[in-house]
Image (cartoon, helix red, strand yellow):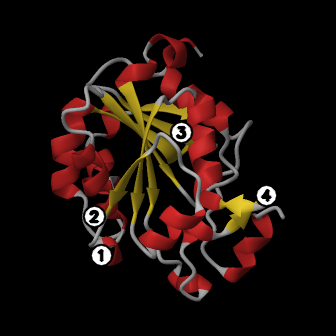
Amino acid sequence: MTGKQDHPEEIAGLLLAAGGGRRLGGRPKALLEHRGRPLVEHAVGVLRAAGCTRVHVVLGAQAEAVRERAELPGCVLVENPHWKQGMGSSLRAGLASLDGTGARAALVSLVDQPGIGPEAVARVLAAYQGEWSLVSAAYDGVRGHPVLFGAAHWAGIAASATGDQGARGYLKAHGEAITLVECADIAEPYDIDTEADLGHLEP
């Protein structure tokens, strides 16, 4: 995990936590309870434990309630007023918030994937090779989260991030440049999308 230790200040953690939980009866995913605390707290803790010293959190649905209920000391909270447009708008807002911070890469994770812990995030961080890096966790060879975007790619990603696609189109177009980091042995990439998925959360 040398990458994590050599360049912590260069890589910002970017947590996308704006979703409204449409298929969960409109319960914002950031506020779902996991181990007795809001899920957004758990997700920030994972980024910190993996070595991200700067963490930006993109909020959207019930942002005020998230600010009140979640303890996110030291995080930069970025409000996305267009969160209903999908993940692409949150990714754009998050990347824009990193302009001028000195970050040379963004490690992007999703709030609703508690099966992905610090070990997987640290593996992705360790593959960082500067601002042209494109790194993605893979699960049995299939690309997933987290993903690391070097700063040289941010403008292109922001320009192509629409709807719920996020960076999918950009990554597809730049497939040959992506370093895949296998994480299936240490993480499970399930999403908390439906009522049935709530069983993955711990009391």
Taking 96 as reference, is 151 above or below it?
above
Asked if residue 141 can be seen in this view, the reply is no
Q: Nearer the viewer, mark 1 or mark 3?
A: 1
- Please name the amino acid that badge 4 sits on: Arg
- Indicate which disc residue 85 carries: 1
Quarter of the figure that contains the C terminus? bottom right
- Name which quarter of the figure residue 64 lies in: bottom left
Q: CA distance from mark 2 to mark 1?
A: 6 Å
Q: Are marks 2 and 1 in contact (CB under 8 Å)?
A: yes
Residue at mark 4 = 35
3 or 2: tag closer to the N-terminus: 2
Residue at horizontal 71 percent and vertical 60 percent from the top: 37
- Please name the amino acid that badge 1 sits on: Gln
Compared across the picture, whether 149 is left or right of 43 comes to left
Residue at mark 3 = 137
- Please name the amino acid that badge 3 sits on: Ala
Residue at horizontal 46 percent and vertical 76 percent from the top: 62
